[in-house]
């Protein structure tokens, strides 16, 4: 295999066994998506009309009335919040993030201010919103959420993510019920979720997704929802969304990725190959683990007699060349995870031999 352009810059080769991590460049594109990006880059197009057609196609996929393409889900939160504040008032759109007297409060529950690399509430602020966090670390009730509403409330925000602490929280159905009763729209951050229609079908007014996570597209995203609010989202392109400009390449890459989605079922084979290879190494125990958030992902688990050796193994994999990144959320429970979705087939053997080298020397 030839060097990647990143190696030509002198950067280390990366094998990503940690999942779809922004810090490692999100998804590696399928060649059909990469081709769509390259072809798109070589021509002009009426961007306004491209956005409309792409919006139509994405909305159809999600069973929504309309859709707006964004640079990602973080931008989707900012633009969605802006739309809930300004509606179709052009003057207000041009003034954001100053709101001059408009209702600007965005109510969310404690535990939903997720840090995905930046904070959800900061994206709310970027869109002109003032976050109002209801409840505390113990939990949140529908009554507490309702008490946080006022005539300054512009919208409700629900974060659907494995990063939230939702055990004692308000469900999305409850929040949508409250929004309906009070005439307040609900925006859902579903950045990394796989199901493109579930939250719209549940009655959410706006739902934002990342194109580079579950869908496997380039660095892009979208918002799906009601026609009136999506029009207000599009209008932000003469305001704050100009600082989050989406290129024609990203739009076409997103459509190509959606055409394939959920195409790559190749990973169960790679999971099996890694499981088999690692199982042959004495001194470690290997398992297959379900996703803790209930998504349709399985991963290879590795444990050994001491947690210190497990941390040494992480450093051995990470520090070598190529650098192998693993999923380390459950290390404290004695479990190291390998997520093979972004691992090329030929790299499975590289992982096996690097683990084997470590075990020979240390266990
Ligand atoms: C990743 C993530 C985001 C940001 O998505 P981008 O597409 O990278 O902008 C927002 N919210 C949550 C919960 C995320 O996991």
Image: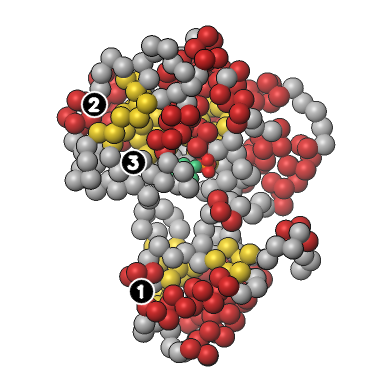
Task: Say the numbered circle drawn on residue 112.
Answer: 3
- Residue located at (78% from left, 61% from top): 8
- Residue located at (79% from left, 66% from top): 2
Precedes in sequence: disc 3 or disc 2: 3
Q: Is residue 262 visible?
A: no
Q: Secondary structure at mark 3?
A: loop
Q: Where does the image place residue 190, in percent across and percent down from the top left? A: 43, 40
Precedes in sequence: disc 1 or disc 3: 3
Q: Where does the image place residue 126, in percent across and percent down from the top left? A: 48, 29
Residue toward you, 20 or 332 = 332
Left/right placement of residue 105 relative to residue 261 reads: left
Left/right placement of residue 181 relative to residue 119 reads: left
Residue 200 sits in which quadrant? Answer: top left
- Residue located at (19% from left, 31% from top): 144
Q: Are marks 3 and 2 in contact (CB under 8 Å)?
A: no
Is the C terminus in the top left, top right, bottom left or bottom right quadrant? bottom left
Left/right placement of residue 141 relative to residue 10 reads: left
Q: Is mark 2 within 8 Å of ligand 1?
A: no
Q: CA distance from mark 2 to mark 1?
A: 41 Å
Residue annotated with mark 1: 334
Q: Secondary structure at mark 2?
A: loop
Q: Secondary structure at mark 1?
A: loop
Left/right placement of residue 85 relative to residue 137 reads: right
Residue 37 sits in which quadrant? Answer: top right
Vertical relation: 324 (above or below) 151: below
Vertical relation: 79 (above or below) 295: above
Task: Say the numbered circle drawn on residue 12.
Answer: none
Is the N terminus in the top left, top right, bottom left or bottom right quadrant? bottom right
Q: CA distance from mark 1 to mark 3?
A: 27 Å
Task: Say the numbered circle drawn on residue 148.
Answer: 2
Q: Tell me the crowding category of disc 1: few under 14, some 14 to 19, or many 20 or more residues within 10 angstroms, Cα based.
A: some
Q: Tell me the crowding category of disc 2: few under 14, some 14 to 19, or many 20 or more residues within 10 angstroms, Cα based.
A: some
């Amino acid at each position: 295999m030839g060097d990647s352009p990143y190696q030509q810059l002198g950067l280390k080769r990366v094998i990503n066994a940690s999942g779809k991590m922004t810090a490692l460049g999100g998804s590696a594109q399928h060649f059909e998506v990469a081709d769509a990006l390259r072809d798109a880059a070589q021509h002009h197009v009426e961007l306004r009309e491209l956005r409309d057609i792409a919006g139509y196609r994405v909305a159809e996929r999600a069973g929504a009335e309309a859709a707006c393409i964004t640079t990602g889900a973080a931008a989707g939160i900012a633009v969605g919040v802006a739309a809930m504040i300004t509606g179709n008032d052009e003057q207000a759109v041009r003034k954001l993030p100053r709101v001059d007297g408009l209702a600007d409060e965005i109510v969310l529950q404690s535990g939903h201010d997720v840090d995905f690399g930046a904070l959800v509430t900061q994206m709310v602020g970027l869109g002109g919103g003032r976050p109002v966090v209801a409840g505390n670390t113990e939990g949140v009730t529908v009554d507490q959420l309702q008490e946080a509403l006022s005539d300054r409330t512009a919208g409700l925000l629900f974060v659907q993510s494995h990063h939230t602490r939702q055990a004692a929280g308000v469900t999305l159905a409850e929040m949508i019920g409250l929004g309906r009763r009070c005439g307040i729209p609900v925006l859902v951050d579903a950045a990394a979720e796989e199901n493109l229609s579930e939250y719209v079908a549940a009655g959410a007014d706006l739902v934002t997704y990342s194109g580079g996570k579950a869908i496997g597209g380039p660095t892009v995203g979208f918002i799906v929802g009601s026609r009136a609010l999506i029009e207000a989202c599009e209008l932000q392109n003469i305001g704050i969304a100009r600082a989050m400009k989406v290129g024609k390449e990203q739009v076409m890459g997103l459509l190509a990725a959606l055409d394939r989605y959920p195409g790559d079922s190749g990973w169960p084979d790679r999971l099996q190959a890694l499981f088999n290879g690692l199982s042959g190494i004495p001194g470690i125990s290997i398992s297959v683990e379900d996703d803790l958030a209930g998504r349709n992902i399985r991963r290879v688990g590795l444990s050994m007699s001491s947690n210190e050796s497990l941390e040494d193994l992480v450093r051995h994999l990470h520090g070598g060349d190529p650098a192998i990144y693993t999923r380390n959320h459950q290390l404290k429970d004695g479990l190291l995870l390998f997520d093979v979705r972004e691992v090329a087939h030929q790299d499975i053997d590289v992982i096996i031999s690097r683990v084997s080298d470590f075990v020979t020397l240390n266990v």
